[in-house]
Every structure is written in structure tokens, then in C-alpha cells.
Amino acid sequence: MNIKLTLLLLFIQISLGFSQSKKLVKISDVLITQEKAWNKGDLHGFMEHYWQNDSLTFISKKGIKKGWNSVYEGYKKSYADKGEMGTLSFKIFKIDLVGPKDALVLGSWKVVNASGTFEGYFTLWFKKINRHWLIVQDHTS
């Protein structure tokens, strides 16, 4: 193989690698931003990273909620004020890019508030919509 073709292939591989890395960083940034918003008591800021659409799906032990407003109202009911919201922390175990505009995130969450410590796991389906990575499905236990 000649040197120009070798360099071209190397450039393509590096570009794809950087592209993948950028996506992973952007998705991680969403979760960091959500954590910060939650810890400031900004529930609306936390929810900005969910798809504002009736097809948004949230699955928990309480059942399935459909639509951004339904998910938001559920959070407001469970966490009425900053004291109830407490402090949130995420741990990300794995981010899988399953297409150019889709990713699955596996992680855990922990909320510490005056009532105690609550924790569990989640799987998030992120989709890139209008240049933003948004959560379109959240399965939290």
C-alpha cells in the first residue's frame, strides 16, 4: 500500500475515534449538568435534558409514564423542594454508541436527603435531536 493511502486510512480511523470520543464526552456532560441542576434544586434545569415530547418514556417501580409533562409532574410530586431533592450523584458504568444518533447509558444514582439515602440503577436511551443529546427513554430502578 502506498504512503498516501496509508495516511488517508490512518486519518479516517483517527477521525472516527475522535468523533466517537466527542459523543461520549457530550453525553457524559449531560449527566454532569443534570447532577449540578438537581443539587441546586433546579428541577426544571434537570428536566431540560429529557426529550420534550409526548413519546418520552420513563419506567420505574411505580409504572410507566409517557410524555415530558408527566415525567416532570412525577418528579415534582416526589421531590417538592430542594430539601427533598437533597444531593444527587451519578456513576456511569458504560456508554454504548448504538448508531450515529443513539446511545445507551448504564449507571447508578444516589440521592441523600433528610429522609435518608436512596439509590438504584438506570438505563438511559439518548438520541441526538437537533444537535442535542436528549434522553428519550429512562428506565430507573
Image: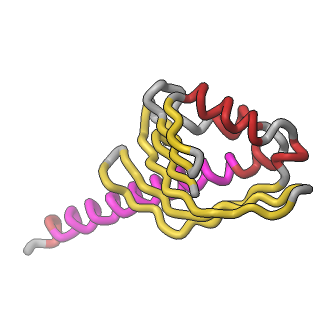
Q: Quadrant of the C terminus?
A: bottom right
Please state the extent of the stretch shown in magenta in the rendering: 6-34
Query: Which quadrant is home to the N terminus?
Result: bottom left
Point 91% across, 56% down: residue: 114
Q: Is residue 13 left or right of residue 52?
A: left
Q: Position of residue 104 (x, y in %)?
A: 42, 55
Magenta stretch encompasses residue 26: yes
Q: Is residue 80 above or below residue 122?
A: above
Q: Nearer the viewer, residue 124 or 12?
A: 124
- Residue 7 image offset from top left, x and y in percent: 23, 67
Outermost residue on the left side: it is 1
Identify the residue at the far bottom of this view.
Answer: 1
The residue drawn where x is 85% and y is 62% is 116
Q: Quadrant of residue 21?
A: bottom left
Residue 81 in the image: state x and y as whole percent: 86, 38
Q: Residue at x 49, y 25 (%)?
A: 53
Would you say 124 lies left or right of 35 here? left
What residue lies at 60% left-to-right and 34% top-to-bottom? 71
Q: How is the image coloured?
A: secondary structure
